[in-house]
Amino acid sequence: MSYLDELFALHGKVVLLTGAAGGIGRALAEGLASAGARMVLADLDLAAVQKLADELPGDDHVPVALDVSKTGLLERTIDDVLAQTGRIDVLVNCAGINKREGLLDVSEETYDRIMAVNLKGVFFLTQTVVKKTLMRTGGRIINIGSYNCTSMLGGVSVYGASKSGVAALTRSMAIEWGKFNITANCIAPGHILTPLTVPTWEHPQRSAYLRERITLGRPGNPDELIGLTLLLASDASGYMTGQLYNVDGGALAGGQPWPYDTAY
């Protein structure tokens, strides 16, 4: 094994990934498994993660039915996972939902559902995993945030608030759990092309609006999040914790310049 392989390899590691059947979750599952991890693939759609488990490189991946908003079931779920795997080394909180509505249109039901999955679920699942194993063994926590942790768009008020909460929660995790040799970091994807965002990118006006605000002028692909995830899951990131890492094609840098400003 080469130096780089050894630095970034995840052989012998167990990774619990929520939202594993989604566009980003599936890409991360493939990347982490390719680096040698044994995957615990958690999602509402059990059939989808069962199929994914069979398709990933490596053997003995574990599909799990999980609704992170059902906090009363989390302890039993983690006990079942540990009975099968014996350990959890890395937790990737990728499950998330959204509903596009203006501030004046959001119902309390919608607000509660988004917060329950995106923030409350992250809080209590991570708390459960730390109590059950990571506070004794150490490990990595990787929370998937959003471009909306830092910059907002119309119609995503509750989603943005929930993801901003995830970024703040990540810092709290890093501060309180560093003594257990746990690192906690947050990846904030920008405008990523997934089945859920295809309608936006196929809409002429919306896609033009977004492209102007992305320095690279295009949406990101889910697999462009794999490299940073591998870094944060591996030994290569041992001194990195409490951080928010934007993977946004330069959107927060300011988008594209006026052609009048750059004649070359």
Image (cartoon, helix red, strand yellow):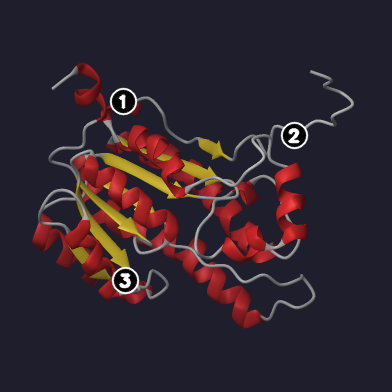
> Dot 2: few (<14), some (14–19), or many (≥20) neighbours within 10 Å?
few
The numbered dot on residue 113 is: none
Q: Percent x, y for residue 94?
A: 42, 56
Q: Are marks 2 and 3 in contact (CB under 8 Å)?
A: no
- The CA span between labels 2 and 3 is 38 Å
Q: Amino acid at mark 2?
A: Gly
Q: Does residue 90 appear to the left or right of 239 in the view shown?
A: left
Which residue is denoted by mark 1 in the rendering? 236
Instruction: Name the residue furthest right.
Output: 260
Q: Does residue 86 appear to the left or right of 202 in the view shown?
A: left
Write down the quadrant of residue 85 in the picture. bottom left
> Dot 1: few (<14), some (14–19), or many (≥20) neighbours within 10 Å?
some
Which residue is denoted by mark 3 in the rendering? 66
Write down the quadrant of residue 71 in the picture. bottom left
Which badge, 3 or 1, is on the more N-terminal residue?
A: 3
> Dot 3: few (<14), some (14–19), or many (≥20) neighbours within 10 Å?
some
Which badge, 1 or 2, is on the more N-terminal residue?
A: 1
The numbered dot on residue 254 is: 2
